[in-house]
Amino acid sequence: MPSILAHAPGFLRDPGGKNHGPRAVGGDVNDMREVEVVVIGAGQAGLSSAHHLRRAGLEPGRDFVVLDRSPGPGGAWQFRWPSLTYGKVHGMHALPGMELTDADPARPSAEVISAYFDRYERAFDLRVRRPVEVRAVREGTGGRLLVETSDGAWSTRALINATGTWDRPFWPRYPGQETFLGRQLHTAQYPGPEAFAGRRVVVVGGGASGTQHLLEIAPYAASTTWVTRRPPVFREGPFDEEAGRAAVALVEERVRRGLPPRSVVSVTGLPLNDAVRRGLADGVLDRRPMFDRVTPDGVEWDRGSPLLERGREPGGGGRVAADVILWATGFRPAVGHLAPLRLREPGGGIRVEGTRAVADPRVHLVGYGPSASTVGANRAGRAAVRDIGRLPERAAA
Ligand SMILES: Cc1cc2nc3c(=O)[nH]c(=O)nc-3n(C[C@H](O)[C@H](O)[C@H](O)COP(=O)(O)OP(=O)(O)OC[C@H]3O[C@@H](n4cnc5c(N)ncnc54)[C@H](O)[C@@H]3O)c2cc1C
């Protein structure tokens, strides 16, 4: 039987001593099904978790189920803009147990990665159920969790939440934003550079998406302006394993204290590659401080702002006219469905030890905070499964 039983003797042992799989409770199979583990999300983190559950001997569909609200395989990658080619993504790690080989760097990463995830799900027979949206997770009966979805309810002993951030784009609020007569959009809606032809575009945000948008849009747009809250920090040299570990440790420390995780770029810095160097040299990446307000036809800085002091806008004062404001302001963890479990700390984040929510040991967050990268998601999936294997003992204690 399952190899994990050697490491985690509690796995698959329910309080009644039966291993019954997805049993219908209350008659109608669509009303309530029972499993050992529900995985929410089939991105890198969810698929890694499913892979390790399977390796532990759990049967997909019977002992665990993966629920995903997206229409097809690929996690958030399936929604990324066509100009984000596979060659442009940095440090994409393969899923455990199957390499991504011979991918054409000129193809959109949305296509390459969705096709790869599709192959992966089939190869390991993970039987992802989609589109199934998890609407709420709450306390169930008998120490179980109740997972309410667009396709009925599930009762589970443990939960692996792997919902990523793509579904929660973060829009900061600035005065006058609602008066803007042009178009405002977020990275999550970025259609590619051609849509900005002839437009005056303000890009907000100092992350990798912001710089990539600017470098792509500049050749098409009438003008681009880059504004960020803090001066961007460019990182010289390779992002080696040691730098990666240091970045992860910083986010980990915040999450352990119950604070919301910071963006990856805030701890890694922006990679100084050739395209970025060119952008810095030709002024496309000439960053300005955050504006004070949005006006119907652009953005405005107050008197005394660094922009005015630098005298950068002759005759225009502290204003830049714009047709489009592109908010490349990041994402937040998509964990609203966990609200009934009251996992949040006063600091606004969910405290986790490893992957386990401190407030509820049945709940694991993978791809969250320090594990919000493809390599982190891989490791978190494995760690969560290992930890869940010990859950029944802990729950019974
Ligand atoms: C533009 C961009 C580029 C990136 N590039 C890189 C890179 O090059 N290298 C790298 O390592 N990382 C990169 N990252 C980060 C990387 O995408 C993630 O760390 C990793 O792929 C996220 O995997 P995930 O499984 O956590 O989330 P996702 O891929 O977002 O998957 C989450 C899944 O959960 C589903 N879901 C969400 N809510 C629910 C719900 N309530 N019910 C059911 N299903 C739900 C979603 O539909 C989705 O399919 C990038 C991120 C962005 C935004």
Image (tube, grey):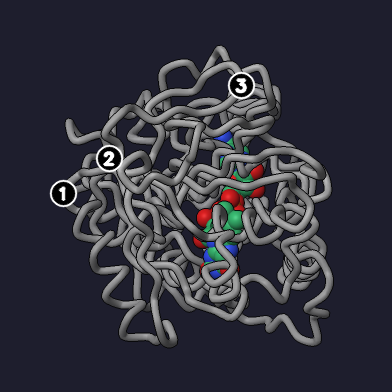
**How far apart are the alpha carbons under marks 2 and 3?**
37 Å
Residue 120 locus on image (x, y percent): 73, 70
Given the image, on which type of amino acid does mark 3 rest?
Asp
**Can residue 65 be seen in the rendering of this structure?**
no
The answer to which of marks 1 and 3 sits earlier in the sequence is 1
Q: Which residue is mark 3?
A: 297
- Name the one closer to the observer, 147 or 336: 336
| In the rendered image, the vertical position of residue 365 relative to residue 377, given as above or below | above
Q: Residues within 10 Å of mark 2 (few under 14, many from 20)?
A: some
Between 17 and 227, the one nearer to me in the picture: 227
Q: Quadrant of residue 157?
A: top left
**Tag in front: 2 or 3:** 3
Q: Nearer the viewer, residue 222 or 154?
A: 222
Mark 1 vs mark 3, foreground winner is 3
Q: Residue furthest top?
A: 179
Question: Which element type, helix, strand or loop, lies under badge 2?
Answer: loop
At horizontal 35% and vertical 48% (from top left) the residue drawn is 310
- Eyeballing the image, is 139 above or below 4? above
Residue at left offset 44%, top offset 41% = 332
**Local crowd at mark 1 within 10 Å, few (<14), some, or many (≥20)?**
some
Where residue 264 appears, as percent x and y from the top left, is: 40, 60
Q: Nearer the viewer, residue 330 or 149?
A: 330
Element at label 3: loop
Compared across the picture, whether 181 is left or right of 111 comes to: left
The residue to which callout 1 is attached is: 257
Ligand 1 shows up in the quarter that is bottom right
Residue 349: assigned label: 2
Amino acid on which the number 2 mark rests in the picture:
Gly
Q: Are marks 2 and 3 in contact (CB under 8 Å)?
A: no
Q: Who's the residue at 51% across and 32% down the image? A: 316
Cβ atoms under marks 1 and 2 closer than 8 Å: yes
